[in-house]
Amino acid sequence: MRGHPAALPGRCPRTRAHRARLQPANRPGGTVPAGATVTCLIGAANRDGNRYRDPDRFDVLREDLTTTTAFSAAADHLAFALGRHFCVGALLAKAEVETGVNQLLDAMPDVRLADGFDPVEKGVFTRGPQSLPVRFTPVVD
């Protein structure tokens, strides 16, 4: 593959974000026909109401996730995939979040959503609010 890097995506299925159905699949919302392209949407992961309490609410302190394995291949959520397909950047993401959030809270200890702002998720492959207006009192050194 070293001499033919352009051929890699077609030979390595993990590099593609979608698959074609080989057989029809019956789902609660209808049937996915054979040959249809199916795309995995990360924003839909971990939304199983049978597994997670209040699955559509973002809660950093939720008690129904195992925090000791959250950033490992043994995680009980799908944010970084599972097993041998686990994201090699998960620990970097963890370090970035811990560093960024700590710096943010040190600089703006009272940061909060702007009054009346109700975040609405947007996007297909990555989901989040289009904007995030906040209020805070700057820390003066």
Image: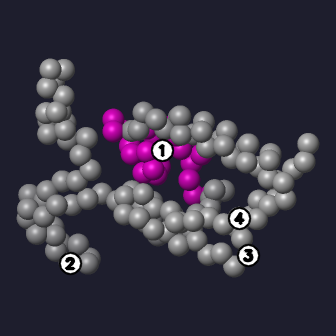
From the top left corner, tell me how far across and down residue 51 is, in percent.
47, 63
Badge 3 marks a residue whose secondary structure is loop
Q: Which residue in the protein does label 1 denote?
A: 75
Badge 1 marks a residue whose secondary structure is loop
Q: Which residue in the protein does label 4 denote?
A: 134
Badge 4 marks a residue whose secondary structure is strand
- Alpha carbon distance from label 1 to label 3: 35 Å
Dot in front, 1 or 3: 3
From the top left corner, tell me how far across and down residue 107 is, in percent.
80, 47
For label 2, count other residues whose C-alpha is less than 10 Å away and answer few (under 14), some (14-19) or many (20+).
few
For label 4, count other residues whose C-alpha is less than 10 Å away and answer few (under 14), some (14-19) or many (20+).
few
Determine whether label 1 and label 2 are within 8 Å by CB. no
* Camera-side residue of 49 and 91: 91
| Badge 2 amino acid | Gly
Residue drawn at x 15%, y 20% as measured from the top left: 3
Dot in front, 1 or 4: 4
Span of residues in magenta: 63-85
Compared to residue 115, the image places residue 91 above or below, namely above
Q: Is residue 24 left or right of residue 79?
A: left
Dot in front, 1 or 2: 2
- The disc, 2 or 4, on the residue closer to the chain's N-terminal end is 2
Q: Which residue in the protein does label 2 denote?
A: 30
- The dot on residue 115 is 3
Q: Is residue 18 left or right of residue 60?
A: left
Determine whether label 1 and label 3 are within 8 Å by CB. no
- The disc, 1 or 4, on the residue closer to the chain's N-terminal end is 1
Q: Quadrant of residue 138?
A: bottom right
| Badge 1 amino acid | Ala
From the top left corner, tell me how far across and down residue 46 is, in percent.
45, 60
| Badge 4 amino acid | Val
